[in-house]
Image (spheres, rainbow, N blue to C red):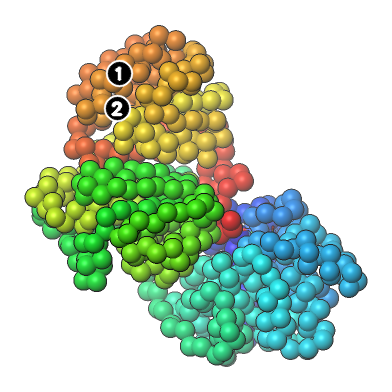
Amino acid sequence: MCGIVGAVSQRNVEKILLEGLKRLEYRGYDSAGMALVHNQKFLINKAVGKVSALAELVQQSNISGKTGIAHTRWATHGIPSQNNAHPHTSENISIVHNGIIENYKELRSELIELGYVFLSETDTEAVVHLFHYHYKQTHDLMLSLQQTIKKLQGAYGLVVMCENEPDTILGTRSGSPLVVGIGIDENFLASDQLALRQVTDRFIYLEEGDVVKLRSNSIDIFDQSFSPVVREEVVISDVHDAADKDGFRHYMLKEIFEQPEAIARTLDGRISHESVVQDLLGEEARTVLSQVTQVQIVACGTSYHAGLIAKYAIEEWAGIPCLVDIASEYRYRKVIVPDNALFISISQSGETADTLAALRKAKASGYLSSLAICNVPNSSLVRESAFSLMTCAGVEIGVASTKAFTTQIVALQLVALMLAEKRKEEHKSIVQALHQLPDYCQRVLELNDRIEKISEHFVEKHHALFLGRGVQYPVAMEGALKLKEISYIHAEAYAAGELKHGPLALVDSDMPVITVAPNNELLEKLKSNLEEVQARGGKLYVFADQSAGFSEDANTQVFNLPHVPACIAPIIYTLPLQLLSYHVAVMRGTDVDQPRNLAKSVTVE
Ligand code: HGA
């Protein structure tokens, strides 16, 4: 989602800011802007569209400055336009903002009464005028920031700059992430450390409510009661350069093909020959997990589907009931928390606003403990949960999640095994299957060429139906989500047994029906459901176990997958669906890595 970069230095920073924004591009955004201070005057450029358009403007206007703030915006209030793009300015104050100010209408009316003129439709503009109002009276930046945030309701990561104090930038966060990058004779702020990896490997993650004042040679942090605090410095030495496509046409394809390696990393050091390393999360967690009698999983989007798949493992392997909720629903409903219930949240970025809010609600609701499944160490979700298990997927750039999803499933399966400690004798076959998983994934990826060919069938389609049964139903849901996200084809997933209760009415010769069919106890039931589709002239695309006995005809395409143990089938059957969506999107000419209207790391509610 939208990104923030700020810098205060003894050298010109416009290139650093632009490079930072570029590194955040993968999150999805609709416009970009930058403000520099030079000779106590703001120099501002904004562009609708890509960061490259902003970079061109900056180059043409030939501006530079030693202090600056920059932003990529994913519109929540007001259309994507130059006027609505950040930074927003009120005379000598300039601000960039991630998040949503919920009480902006009240603030706006009050500020209009005070004589302020609004030039944009954003919620953010109320913040900059409010800040200006306080600064006019106090002439003190920190005090003005304190007074401003006292009046804000909602979520924000804010970075502020002032013409009168050009050697300073201020930052604060509540509900949106903000990290300080420590340099030599220069310091930085960003919504994600990735934006600053070209200038430093030293970071300080701000806590909720923290306020920071940065100069080129000082960093002063205050907590939410405005007392000075020292936050730990973290050195991130991972030199992996996420910005490299390694010869693939898109990040998404690269990330699909990285899955065997990513899954191997998720498992690395966590399973022995026959069982899960029971102390994986530490001794304390082991004690906690041994007491768990119910699990509540909460997540959004693709991570929600990983949760739905994990429910099957937790219930079957550990015999523990498991509820799965969408975070934006969970956070606003009355929740009954039974004794000894474990709260598990899942988020690739660890900054997903709804998931974080759900975790905060859970922590106040009497769960036994909280566990985060996450791809980003030091993220808010990880820091605020009692325990965390990293998915180790590596940086994921494509907005449509692929390797983050499959590694989430693997991590959740490890949790299911830990919860099933008492049934250790059953672990052996599951763990052995997990050991084989990267190789099986590799084999399934060999279907790529054939899937690419078949994708042509979908180019002109407007709708598609995905079917699955049992644990393959959430796999079908993920397949449908992937297709709609990146190809913009309307896709729906149904539990195949539900077909006759409504969706069968949609089936005709123009409706492709995609099915995942491992050879399991539900296969015959699924076959009957597919007969119902064939009888209505529907076009079937079946990804099936090679031993499942499907045969091709004019209306049925069959893709044979290796016979795999049931426990890893959800991952194995996800891969061809990812490839299908990818190739259909490429053929339809969409922006595969940054699909329209979507963003990665959804830091707004
Ligand atoms: N609400 C602000 C900022 C949006 C945002 O954080 N997007 O990710 C706006 O609409 O400009």
Which residue occupies 60% across, 86% down? Answer: 226
Q: Is residue 343 above or below residue 437?
A: below
Residue 185, visible in the rendered structure: no
Label 1 packing within 10 angstroms: few (<14), some (14-19), many (20+)? some
**Secondary element at tag 2:** strand
Quadrant housing the C terminus: bottom right
The answer for how far apart the CA atoms under marks 2 and 1 are is 9 Å
Label 2 packing within 10 angstroms: few (<14), some (14-19), many (20+)? many
Proximity of marks 2 and 1: CB atoms separated by less than 8 Å: yes
Q: Is residue 19 above or below residue 131?
A: above
The x and y percentages for residue 587 are 52, 32
Which residue occupies 33% across, 53% down? Answer: 295
The x and y percentages for residue 371 are 35, 62
Residue type highlighted by circle 1 = Lys
Which residue occupies 41% across, 79% down? Answer: 234
Q: Is residue 551 above or below residue 351?
A: above
Residue type highlighted by circle 2 = Ala
- Residue for badge 2: 517
Q: Is mark 1 within 8 Å of ligand 1?
A: no
Which residue occupies 66% across, 67% down? Answer: 153
Q: In the displayed structure, does residue 423 sit left or right of residue 216?
A: left
Q: Quadrant of ligand 1?
A: bottom right
Q: In the displayed structure, does residue 472 sit left or right of residue 62?
A: left
Q: Earlier along the polypeptide chain: callout 2 or callout 1?
A: 2
Disc tally is 2
- Residue for badge 1: 527
Residue 562, visible in the rendered structure: yes
The x and y percentages for residue 147 are 71, 81
The part of the image, by quadrant, that contains residue 604 is bottom right
Quadrant housing the N terminus: bottom right
**Secondary element at tag 1:** helix
